[in-house]
Image (cartoon, grey):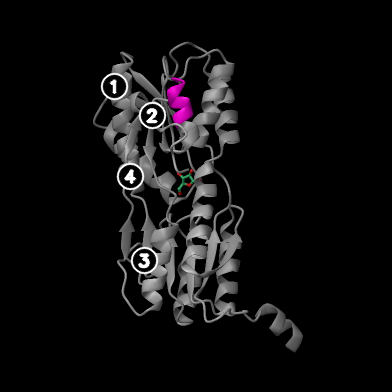
Amino acid sequence: MLILAFWNSPALARVDGKIVVGFSQIGAESAWRVANTKSVREAAERAGVTLILSDAQQKQENQIKAVKKFILQKVDVIVIAPVVSTGWEEVLLAAKEANIPVILVDREVKDMNSGLFVSFIGADFYEEGRRAALCLIDQSRKLKITGKIKIIELRGTVGSSPSILRNKGFTDVIAKNPQFRIVRSEVGDFKESIGKEWMQKIVASMPKPGSFNAVFAHNDNMALGAISAMDAAGLKPGRDIVVVSVDGIDQAFVAMRAGKLNCSVECSPLLGPQLMDAVQTLMSGGSISKLIITKAGVFPAEAASKYVGQRPY
Ligand code: AHR
C-alpha cells in the first residue's frame, strides 16, 4: 500500500529552488501546435523555469490525469491548453484547493468568469472568425466570383473553443451578407490529412461545377490538405474557389504565393514569452491580468510573397 501511494505521488526533484511549471499540452495536430510547444519550451529554458511537459494526444482524459499528477507533484504553476472547453471544473477546483495557480494558454474553457484559473493567455478566436469572413468576402469580389457564394467549412475539434468561436464569428458576418452561405460543414480536427480526406469526399459527392466556390478552414493545415485534394481533382483553388484559413504558418504563405490560398488570418502560437512572464510575476507575488489577448494581423494573398521564409512559425 505504502509503495503504491509513493508511486502515485512521485517526489519532485527540484533544482536550485527553480520555479516548476506543469504544462498539459494538447498534442501535435498542426504546425501551429508544434510551434506553440517549441515557444513554451524555449521561453521556459530562457527564464530558468523547470517545465514538465505532458502531451495529451488530443484527449481530455489525458489532460485531467496530467493535471492530477501535477497536483501530487506539488508544481508551482499548472498551465493547461484545454482541448475542449467543458468538463474542467472538478480538476480546476482540485488545483485551487491545493493552492496551485492555473494559467490557461491558447484555448478557453466554457466559464471564462470562473475563479478557478488566474489567467488566460491566447487569441480572440471570435474575431479571427469574423476576419476570415470579411477576407473571404473581399477576396471573392477581387476574383470576380459573382452570384451565390457556396462555402465549405472545415471545422476544428468538436467542442474546442477555436472551433466554436471561429464558426460563430464567421457565421455572424456572413449572416449579414445573404449572397454567402455555408453549404457544407465538416470536422477536420485541425489536421491536414483530415482536411484532405474531407475535400476528396466533397469533390466526389458534389461534382457539378459551381456546387461550391469557397472554403473556410479553421486552420491553415486543413486548408492545405483541402487545396491538395482540389488540385488533384483538377479544380482551381485560389482562382475559381476562394480559400481562407487561420494561423499564418509559413506553409500558408507558400500556398498564397502560389496563388492557391487567398487569405490567412493570423493566430500567433508564440505564447511562451508572455506565459513565462506571467509565471514569474505570479511567483514573485505580483498580480497578472485575467485575460491576456494576443495581437495578430490578417494576410491577404497579394501581401504574402514578401513573408515567405520570414515567418517565425
Ligand atoms: O487553438 C489554436 C488552434 O489549434 C490552431 O488554430 C490550430 O492550428 C491548432 O491546432
Residue 185 in the image, given as x and y percentages of width and height: 46, 33
Of callouts 3 and 4, the N-terminal one: 3
Q: Amino acid at mark 3?
A: Ser
Whether residue 256 is situated above or below residue 218 in the rendered picture: above
Q: Residue at x 57, y 62 (%)?
A: 63
For the residues bearing labels 4 and 1, Cβ distance under 8 angstroms: no
Left or right placement of residue 79 versus residue 138 in this view: right
Left or right placement of residue 140 versus residue 218 in this view: left
Q: Residue at x 60, y 62 (%)?
A: 54
Q: Amino acid at mark 2?
A: Lys
Q: Amino acid at mark 1?
A: Gln
Q: Which residues are magenta?
A: 253-259
Which residue was labeled with disc 2?
306
Query: From mark 3 to mark 4, how far is it between C-alphas?
Result: 19 Å
Quick check: is the Cβ at mark 1 less than 8 Å away from ligand 1? no
Of callouts 3 and 2, the N-terminal one: 3
Residue 240 in the image, given as x and y percentages of width and height: 42, 14
Which residue was labeled with disc 1?
179
Query: From mark 3 to mark 1, how far is it between C-alphas?
Result: 40 Å
Quarter in which the N terminus is drawn = bottom right
Query: From mark 1 to mark 2, how far is it between C-alphas?
Result: 33 Å
Which residue was labeled with disc 4?
296
Query: From mark 3 to mark 2, how far is it between C-alphas?
Result: 36 Å
Which residue was labeled with disc 3?
119
Q: Is 297 within the magenta?
A: no
Q: Residue at x 38, y 60 (%)?
A: 274
Secondary structure of the residue carrying numbered label 1: loop
Q: Amino acid at mark 4?
A: Ala
Secondary structure of the residue carrying numbered label 3: strand
Please tell me how crowded label 4 is: few (under 14), some (14-19), or many (20+) other residues with Cα within 10 Å: some
Of callouts 3 and 1, the N-terminal one: 3
Residue 146 in the image, given as x and y percentages of width and height: 31, 13
